[in-house]
Structures are given as C-alpha cells and as structure tokens.
Image (cartoon, grey):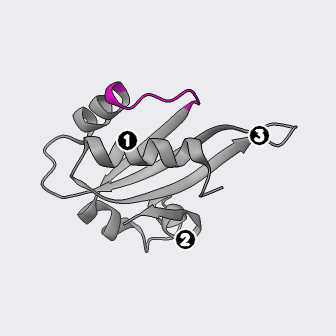
Amino acid sequence: MTNNPEIQGVVSKLIEKCSDIETIYLISNKISTNGTLTSFKLSLIVKDEVESISELECRLYMEVDSDMPYDIVLYTRKEFDELKDDEGTFAWKIYNSGAVLYG
C-alpha cells in the first residue's frame, strides 16, 4: 500500500507545504470489500522548533486536499523519540508497525 498513488500524492503535497517534516509514517489504511483504498492515516514527525503542533495540523489540512479521506497525527521529534520505546503508546505502535514513506 505504500506505493499507492493517492497516498504518495498526499505525502508529496505535505512535504511541499511543510519543510519542518522529518519523517512520515503510513499508520493504517482502510480497504473496501472490492479491494480499493477508501482512507488512510499518516503520522508526521516534525522538527522540535515547530511552535504549535495544533496550528501546523490545521494549516496542513487546509492546504493539502485529497479526493480520499485521510488523517494525520503529528509529533515533534523529541516527543516521538521519548515515546517510541514506551510499549503501549501510540508512538510505539507507529514506530513498530508503521511504514516509513519519507525520511
């Protein structure tokens, strides 16, 4: 699923709109009964210098449009690195089962 054109298109647009992105993970995707992609979720790891994760998230949703529904989850690099080894956290799940699409 990592080479899906719709997912890759969104990843490209996110990278184009935000130079603070260091890593992008594909967390999950939903497939219809006929085998087509219906939605997906990405995690963005951004530079620690980002002042407001919530403002960045809102801006990216406004600037990156897709015909397919998608979600993004953002972490600063420091926050992600602190949580990725803590079993049971969402960051741990992303780190251990997500697919790196960028970075």
Tell me where the magenta segment starts and ends, as one range: 62-69
Q: Position of residue 74 (x, y in %)?
A: 35, 48
Q: Is residue 16 left or right of residue 48?
A: right
Q: CA distance from mark 1 to mark 2?
A: 25 Å
Circle 2 sits on which residue?
96
Circle 3 sits on which residue?
36
Q: What residue is drawn where x is 87% and y is 38%?
A: 34
Q: What residue is drawn where x is 13% and y is 44%?
A: 51
- Which three-letter amino acid code belongs to the residue tagged 2? Asn
Q: CA distance from mark 1 to mark 3?
A: 22 Å
**Secondary element at tag 2:** helix
Circle 1 sits on which residue?
13
Q: CA distance from mark 3 to mark 2?
A: 25 Å
Q: Is residue 50 left or right of residue 95?
A: left
Q: Quadrant of residue 57?
A: top left
Q: Position of residue 20 (x, y in %)?
A: 21, 53
